[in-house]
Each structure stands twice: as structure tokens, then as C-alpha cells.
Image (cartoon, rainbow, N blue to C red):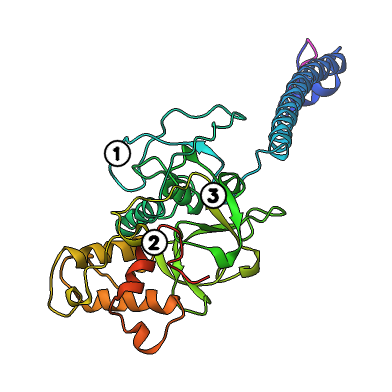
Amino acid sequence: MLVTAAGVVLGGGGVAAAGDHDVPGAHHGREKARETRGDGRGEVRDGRGDVGEGRGEGRGSRAQAREGRGNVRGRVREDRADGDAPTPQGRAAPLYGRASSAPGSGAPGTVRPPGVAAAPELKPATRADIVKRAQTWVEAKVPYSMDKYWSDGYRQDCSGYVSMAWGLAGNEWTGSLAGFGVQVPRDRLQPGDILLFHNTADPHNGSHVTIFGGWTDYTHSHYLAYEQTRPTTRKQATPSGYWNNADRYLAYRYKGLVEGTAPQGAAGVPAFPGARHFRPGLSGPHVERLGKQLVSRGFGKHYKVGPGPRWSEADRRNVEDFQRAQGWRGAAADGYPGPETWRRLFSTTGDGVRR
């Protein structure tokens, strides 16, 4: 190791040693450096604190946003509780426009403002009108939907279907349909009436409505139901009331119902043309007229296509169903119309189905 005249040590790492221990002010310099680095770190930490504070404010803003969203949701729930509760069919709404001919693709038209009910406009309708309109959806196989509208403007669910068949001015739901009808005893049901179950405690649980198409047997244990259900509109023999909650279904008759007019004959019924017109292989206008009346009264389930002018086994079976619904048996329910079958079928007084 060498020492210069100035006292500087050379070799063996002496620079480092002298620098650490012998240079005046070395400790102070290191402390200043540490202080400077400490200040820097402090500033960084302070900066991080500022950032953390900013993040805290951000979190606070997000919390306020959540609170705001909660308030909005709360208000929505309160609004629904005030009478705009969600329903299994969709709430009452106006008809939708014909924006497309594709099934289920109707685009919305003018929407009724929230809380504003449509005026109850009751268009006159005969039983034949109601059943005929109901049949159009059956033939079109309209898909079931609670939020889509058919090309005629009616919602594609059970209550929209009834709204369409009754010719109502808008789309109703199970909670409002009763207001457009008059309750009647079940044993007085006639084609075009409805069977309605609205579960007021929980509208989502079982609420449904069907259109009565006529009794399918003389015991009145089953009826021909027109209904909008999954997957598409259908008509089929259904237990009195319905498959479930049967005793909770109430019968209603459209308030706008009017009696249809028919060519005058005895007791306001068209004259019976004679049994000879209704035999296998025969054709004529009387056969087609009979078939159309059977359909309008809800006794057309055996027709695959038609009815038409040629007498067929489907005609006979439909007539038999009608006769059996009167409580007749044996030769009185052979499926061939006679004067009394004709009178009851075309009667405008509603005695075509046994009560």
C-alpha cells in the first residue's frame, strides 16, 4: 500500500476504504443522499397517496353510481308495485303495425304512454266472428311469444290471442280481460266465450285463458279449446276448465256480442233442405253451409281441409259430435242431420249446445 504526499491511499481497495472512513464530510454526504433519496421516496409515496386518494374518490364515485342505480331499481320496483307489475303475457298495450309479413316479426307502432289505459272500444261481434278469427291463428300456426306481435298487431300469447278473437282495440292480459266480458255459469258456455284463470296472488303462476269452442261430449267433461300456447296456436279437446287449476277458471262472455242474422225460416232458422242432401258421395251448397256452421259452433275438429261442398266422413263425425253434445245417443246421434239437428245448429238463441 502506498501513501501519497496528499495522504491518498493507493492500491488494495484503499480508495473505497478511505472514501468510506477518512474523507471529511463523507457521512454527511451519505446522510444527505439518503435524505434526498428519502425525500424522493416520500414524494413518491405522497404521490402514491394522492393516487390512492384519487382511487378512493373513484371508488366513492362508483359507490355513488351503484347507489344511484339502486335508487333507480328501487323506483322501478315501486312503480311496478303501484300497478305495473310484470305479467306472464305482457302488459296491456296497443296494437302493433304491420311492418313485416314474417311470423313474429311485427315491428312496434305507436306505443301507449305508460300509465295511460286504452279506451274500452267494444266492436260488435257474433259468435261465428269470434270462432272464425280464432281459427285463423290455428291455421297459420302462430308461434307463441310474450313479446312478439303477429301481422294483425296482436301479441302472440294467450291473452293477445283472445284480444284478437274478440276484436279488442288493444292487447289485454289475464288481469284485464274480465273487464271486457260478463261472467256466466260454466254450464251456460257457448262458442266464443272464454275460460279465464288469473292468479291475482302471483300472475306468473298458472294464469291462462282459452276460447270455448263447444262441448265435445254430452257429459260436458271436455270442450274444444282454442288457445295460444307453446309451440303454436292449437285447438283440441280439453278437460272442463283446463288441464290444471280447473276449478279456478271462470267463464266470461264478450260484452260486445251480437246475435248473427240468418236467412229466415221457422223460428228464425234457415229451412232444413232435407236429409237426402247429406249422404256419402253427394255434393251441394247445403253440405258446405252445414260444415261452415259446424265450424262456427266449434264442432269442426274432424276437418283436415274444408269444409267443402262434398259430403264426407269428416262431416258425419262432426255432426255426430254436435248431436252427442245435445245428450243424444243411438240413432239420434248417427251423424246425419235431421230437422232438429239443423234447427239447433243454426239457432241464434244459443240452444245449439245442451245446458
Label 1: few (<14), some or many (≥20) within 10 Å?
Answer: few
- In the image, 127: left or right of 92? left
* Residue to which mark 1 is pinned: 100
Dominant SS type (magenta): loop
Badge 1 amino acid = Ser
| Circle 3 residue | 89
Q: Is residue 321 magenta?
A: no
Separation of disc 1 and disc 2 at Cα?
Answer: 40 Å
Pick whichever of labels 3 and 2 is earlier in the sequence: 3
* Spatial separation of the CA atoms under disc 3 and disc 1: 22 Å
User: How many C-alpha atoms fall within 10 Å of the one at disc 3: few (<14), some, or many (≥20)?
Assistant: many
Dot in front, 3 or 2: 2
Q: Is residue 199 left or right of residue 187?
A: right
Residue in view at x 85 percent, y 22 percent? 21
> Amino acid under label 3?
Gln
**Left or right relative to 306: residue 199:** right
Q: Residue at x 28, y 42 (%)?
A: 101
C-beta proximity under 8 Å, tags 3 and 2: no
For the N terminus, give its image quadrant: top right
Q: CA distance from mark 3 to mark 2?
A: 36 Å
**Label 1 residue SS:** loop
* Magenta stretch in the rendered image: 6-10
Q: Nearer the viewer, mark 1 or mark 2?
A: 2
Disc 2 target residue: 347
**Picture quadrant of residue 275:** bottom left
Residue 236, by quadrant, is: bottom left
Residue 145 at x, y percent in the picture? 45, 51
